[in-house]
């Protein structure tokens, strides 16, 4: 009989996201397995603590960002994991004519 690994506390894709989005996700999926409750509490705490800086950033820079024209159009890399998307991202990052976001910025866009 194989033993399951315990839920990893800090591994959740929305841990640094929007508190409002997290609450909506919890509301729509209320049946949380007991072993995932510590992770859900961590995500709740992290999203709640990041709400004030997110609000400040939105108030301070929201209009500026909304009114910023982006030319030329950005390139989005979309694909299933293990298909070379990270490699393509790394290759495009080598071109000095392009700007890019880091892998951390992609996985935690709310920070």
Image: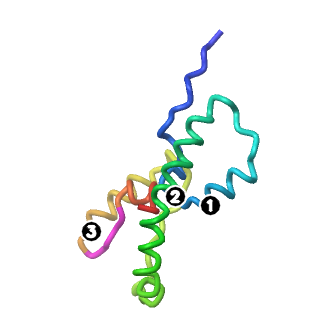
> Which quadrant: the N terminus?
top right
**Labelled disc at residue 21:** 1
Q: Which residue is mark 3?
A: 95
Q: Are marks 2 and 1 in contact (CB under 8 Å)?
A: yes
Q: Is residue 23 above or below residue 62?
A: above
Crowd band around label 1 with a 10 angstrom C-alpha radius: few (<14), some (14–19), many (20+): few
Q: Earlier in the sequence, mark 3 or mark 1?
A: 1
Q: How is the rendered protein coloured?
A: rainbow
Between 65 and 51, the one lying in front of the other is 51
What is the quadrant of residue 101 in the picture? bottom left
Between 83 and 58, the one lying in front of the other is 58
Q: Which residue is mark 2?
A: 17
> Which quadrant: the C terminus?
bottom left
Q: Position of residue 86 (x, y in %)?
A: 41, 53
What is the quadrant of residue 68 in the picture? bottom left
Between 44 and 84, the one lying in front of the other is 44
Crowd band around label 2 with a 10 angstrom C-alpha radius: few (<14), some (14–19), many (20+): many
Q: Earlier in the sequence, mark 2 or mark 3?
A: 2
Rounded to the nearest whole Å, what is the CA distance between mark 2 and mark 1? 8 Å
Q: Is residue 30 magenta?
A: no
Rounded to the nearest whole Å, what is the CA distance between mark 3 and mark 1? 35 Å
Crowd band around label 3 with a 10 angstrom C-alpha radius: few (<14), some (14–19), many (20+): few
**Labelled disc at residue 43:** none
Q: Which residues are magenta?
A: 97-101
Left or right? Give the position of 72 relative to 42: left
**In the image, which is nearer the foreground, mark 3 or mark 1?**
1
Left or right? Give the position of 80 relative to 49: right
Q: Is residue 48 above or below residue 6?
A: below
Give me the residue at 76% from left, 40% from top.
Answer: 31
Give me the residue at 70% from left, 33% from top.
Answer: 33
Secondary structure, mark 1, is helix
């Amino acid at each position: 009989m194989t033993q399951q690994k315990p839920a990893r506390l800090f591994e959740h894709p929305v841990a640094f996201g929007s508190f409002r989005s997290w609450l909506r996700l919890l509301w729509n999926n209320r049946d949380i397995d007991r072993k995932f409750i510590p992770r859900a509490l961590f995500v709740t705490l992290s999203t709640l603590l990041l709400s004030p800086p997110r609000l400040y950033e939105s108030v301070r820079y929201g209009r500026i960002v909304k009114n910023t024209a982006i030319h030329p159009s950005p390139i989005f890399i979309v694909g299933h994991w293990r298909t070379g998307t990270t490699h393509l991202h790394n290759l495009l990052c080598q071109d000095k004519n392009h700007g890019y976001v880091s892998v951390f910025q992609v996985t935690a866009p709310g920070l």
